[in-house]
Image: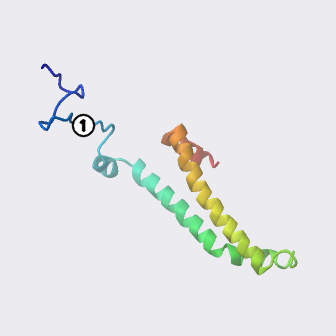
Amino acid sequence: DDKKAGTGDEEDGSGSKAELNHDIGLPASYVTANTTQFPLLWLSVFGNATGGLALLSSSKLMLTDIWQGAAPDIVTGSFATGYVSALGIGMAAGRFGWSALSDYVGRRNTYALFGLGI
């Protein structure tokens, strides 16, 4: 039985076909140590997440301080709570939406959209 190496037809000795490793790209250790893109990308994602959480944690206070004087009948405690809830749901939907878009159009194109400020 002449099996060619690298065709996926190799047997591992147990009677089952061995799975081949089809990793593509550079090793993670090389990317993290020898490129500037990884730390810059990591800092941008970290900054985005930190900013979003900071906004979420202070949004009720900001909403009531800024708008309660202008519209006291509308901006109540329950309205502000609903706003914070909607903001959190929107953030979660955005995370799932961007990840689904990334699966569809590719990671590089998704980050290009991030760079455009969309």
Residue 31: horizontal and vertical position, in percent?
A: 33, 47
Q: Quadrant of the N terminus?
A: top left
**Residue 12 visible in rendering:** yes
Give the labeled residue for mark 1: 19
Q: Is residue 47 left or right of residue 29?
A: right
Colour mode of the rendering: rainbow
* Residue in front for this viewpoint, 111 or 39: 111
In percent of width and height, residue 87 lies at 67, 65
Residue 107: percent from left, percent from top: 49, 42
Question: How many dots with numbers?
Answer: 1
Task: Spot the residue most to the top.
Answer: 2
Q: Does residue 63 appear in the picture of this structure?
A: no
Q: Residue at x 46, y 52 (%)?
A: 41
Closer-to-camera residue (34/2): 2
**Residue at x 61%, y 60% (from the top left corner):** 91
Q: Amino acid at mark 1?
A: Glu
Which quadrant of the figure has residue 92? bottom right
Who's the residue at 61% across and 74% down the image?
57
Dot 1 surroundings within 10 Å: few (below 14), some, or many (20 or more)? few
Q: Is residue 4 left or right of residue 46?
A: left
Seen from the viewer's position, the closer of residues 103 and 31 is: 103
- Can you tell which quarter of the image residue 90 is in? bottom right
Q: Please, what secondary structure does the residue beneath circle 1 have? A: loop
Q: Is residue 22 left or right of residue 46?
A: left
Query: Compared to 63, does 101 lie above or below?
Result: above
What residue sits 29% from the left and 36% below the top?
A: 22
Q: Tell me if residue 84 comes above or below residue 18 in the rendering.
A: below
